[in-house]
Image (tube, rainbow, N blue to C red):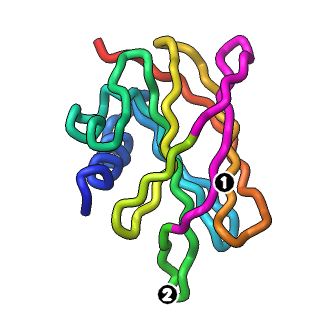
Amino acid sequence: MTVFARCFRSLALVAGLALGSTAVQAESVDFGDYQVHYSVFPSTFLTPEVAAQNQLTRSRAVGILNISILRENDLGGLAPVSGQVEGRVLNDIQQPRFLAFRRIQEGEAVYFISEFQYRSGELLTFHVTARPTGVSEDLPIRFAHTLYNEE
C-alpha cells in the first residue's frame, strides 16, 4: 500500500475513532453497482512528505476533497475505477467556487483530489458529479461540511 493510500485510509480510521470530531468526514454514496467515496479535511492533516509527493499545498486555509469511484466486482467486493469528476463548493453565503480535480493513481487505487480555500468554521456545501469511464450516467453527490483550523 502506498504512502498516499495509507494516509487516506488512516484519515478514514481517525474519522471513525474521533468521537464527535468534525475535522474529517469519510462517507460513501451507493449507486447500485457503483459507490462514490469521499473525504474532506484540512490539508494540514497530510504529512509534509505526502503533500510534496502529490504536489498538494499544506496550509491552514486549504482543504482537500478526495473522491474515489468503486464498482462492485463479480465476487461482491469493490474495485476502484477511473472516470471523471467535477464539482463546485458553495460557502455559507452561497458563493460558488468550481473545484479542479486531479487524478492520482497509485497501483490499483484511483483518487480524484481537489484543493479548495476555506475559512475556519465556514459551512461548505459540496456538489460533485462522478462519471465512471465507459458509463453515460452521472453519479451526483451533495454534502455539507464545516472545517476548522488546528489550534
For residue 139: magenta? no
Residue 15's x, y, as percent?
37, 40
Say which element carries label 2: loop
Inter-mark Cα distance, 2 to 1: 24 Å
Near mark 1 (Cα within 10 A), the count class, few <14, some 14-19 or many ≥20, is many
Residue 150's x, y, as percent?
31, 17
Q: Earlier in the sequence, mark 2 or mark 1?
A: 2
Q: Marks 2 and 1: which is nearer the front? A: 1
Disc 2 marks a residue whose amino acid type is Leu
Residue extending furthest toward the right: 136
Say which element carries label 1: strand
At 61% from the left and 34% from the top, the residue drawn is: 99
Residue 106's x, y, as percent?
35, 61
The answer to the question of whether label 2 and label 1 lie on touching residues, with beta carbons closer than 8 A, is no
Mark carried by residue 90: none
Q: Quadrant of the C terminus?
A: top left
Residue 89's x, y, as percent?
65, 28
Q: Is residue 60 left or right of residue 87?
A: left
Near mark 2 (Cα within 10 A), the count class, few <14, some 14-19 or many ≥20, is few
Residue 150 vertical placement versus 36 (above, below): above
Q: Is residue 112 left or right of residue 128?
A: left
At 25% from the left and 58% from the top, the residue drawn is: 2
Q: What stretch of residues is rendered in magenta?
A: 81-100
Question: Depth check: 117 or 8 in front?
Answer: 117
Question: Depth check: 6 or 58 in front?
Answer: 58
Mark carried by residue 75: 2
Disc 1 marks a residue whose amino acid type is Ala
At 70% from the left and 37% from the top, the residue drawn is: 127
Mark carried by residue 130: 1
Quarter of the figure with residue 52 = top left
Question: Depth check: 149 or 87 in front?
Answer: 87
